[in-house]
Image: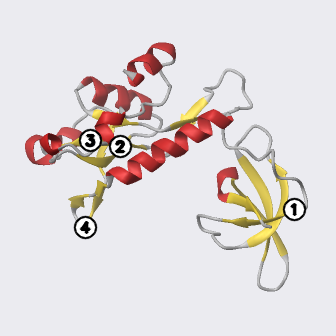
Amino acid sequence: MIEALAMAENPDAPLVPEPTELVADPTRARLRWYVLRSKPHKESVLARYAKGQGHSVFYPTIPYKPVNYRASRIRAYFPGYMFVRADLEGQGVSTFSWMPFSSGLVHVGGEPAPVPDATVRALASRVSEVWAAGGLQAAALHPGERVIIRQGMFEGYEGIFDVKLPGSERVRVLLRMLNNRFVPVEVDVGLVERLP
């Protein structure tokens, strides 16, 4: 129901799983969430196709403010990836490998890697928060404030907030390196947090 309303208003709106799809149900015990990889820039098409084939799909998107006013105002939270709920014993892995615009399921150790229901619920909650806020926000940060990077390659590094980059959800932070020099790096705004 939620997905149908979202798709009717905006075909690029996020496909959010129904609450009943996220609850453990003994009759659906073999259904598990998996990560499905798409061809570049084909996430929304693949999500609609998989949904049309009867699969539960969670394709998290966030609002975006592009420089070009004609560009899409919505982008994938995880570019190139989405979540599908499936019974691989009954359907087989090849079902997802041969879908149009699909690069198949993400494998770990040669096997499709299931994603816990709690993780999908947490992601759905986070995406809802981002939509409620109107996108990833850097407005609360001011130049010169001390910040820390919470995720990614620079996780744990402290620095100084410099500027929000125009037309993107990225910011420039001056990271303090070992020799007390500051090096400018550009990161997603969601990875930066103000230090107390």
Amino acid carrying mark 2 in the image: Phe
Question: In the rendered view, would you say 97 is above or below 68?
Answer: below
Question: In the rendered view, would you say 124 is above or below 192?
Answer: above
Q: Residue beneath label 1, please?
A: 145
Question: In the rendered view, would you say 122 is above or below 130?
Answer: below
**N-term mark: 2 or 1:** 2
Amino acid carrying mark 4 in the image: Gly
Q: CA distance from mark 2 to mark 1?
A: 37 Å
Where's residue 114, x and y in %? 27, 55
Q: CA distance from mark 4 to mark 1?
A: 43 Å
| Residue 79 visible in this rendered orientation of the protein | no
Could you tell me which secondary element the residue under label 2 belongs to? strand
Q: Residue 109, which numbered label?
A: 4
Q: Residue 83, which numbered label?
A: 2
Q: Residue beneath label 3, please?
A: 85
Crowd around label 3: few <14 · some 14–19 · many ≥20 (10 Å):
many
Could you tell me which secondary element the residue under label 4 belongs to? loop
**N-term mark: 4 or 2:** 2
Amino acid carrying mark 1 in the image: Glu
Q: CA distance from mark 1 to mark 3?
A: 43 Å
